[in-house]
Image (cartoon, helix red, strand yellow):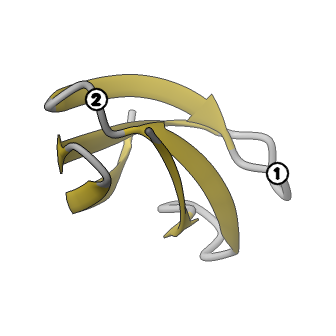
Amino acid sequence: MEVSENIQCPFCGQRFEVTIDTSVSFQRFTTDCEVCCRPFEVIAECEPGEILSLDAVAN
């Protein structure tokens, strides 16, 4: 099950939406900020249908 959540860019502070597949309990992936275009790492811990924690980390 996919869940959308807002995340904040660690570089420019802009918030935007990411979609997380909660069927995977631990995820780590890189995405680009929609505003400043800088890449950063997203770390998510999930249970089916729920995001337990979601962090944005500068690379």
Q: Are marks 2 and 1 in contact (CB under 8 Å)?
A: no
Question: In terms of secondary structure, where does tag 2 sit?
Answer: loop
Q: Position of residue 47 (x, y in %)?
A: 14, 47
Q: Where does label 1 land, which residue?
A: 34
Q: Is residue 29 rendered to the left or right of residue 6? A: left
| Foreground disc of the pair 2, 1 | 2
Q: Position of residue 35 (x, y in %)?
A: 85, 58
Q: Residues within 10 Å of mark 1 (few under 14, many from 20)?
A: few
Q: Position of residue 25 (x, y in %)?
A: 14, 31
Q: Is residue 55 rendered to the left or right of residue 58? A: left
Instruction: Specify the quadrant of the image occupied by residue 26.
Output: top left
Q: Nearer the viewer, residue 25 or 40?
A: 25
Q: Residue at x 31, y 52 (%)?
A: 49
Q: Residue at x 18, y 46 (%)?
A: 46
Q: Residue at x 81, y 53 (%)?
A: 36
Q: Quadrant of the N terminus?
A: top left
Q: Residues within 10 Å of mark 2 (few under 14, many from 20)?
A: some
Q: Position of residue 38 (x, y in %)?
A: 68, 40
Instruction: Count how many numbered circles sit on residues in the image.
Output: 2
Q: Is residue 49 rendered to the left or right of residue 9? A: left
Q: Is residue 53 above or below residue 20?
A: below
Query: Residue 20 bears which disc, if any?
Result: none
Q: Nearer the viewer, residue 3 or 17?
A: 3
Amino acid beneath label 1? Glu
Q: Residue at x 71, y 48 (%)?
A: 33
Question: In terms of secondary structure, where does tag 1 sit?
Answer: loop
Q: Nearer the viewer, residue 41 or 1?
A: 1
Q: Where does label 2 land, which residue?
A: 23
* Separation of residues labelled 2 and 1 (CA atoms): 25 Å
Amino acid beneath label 2? Ser
Q: Quadrant of the C terminus?
A: top left
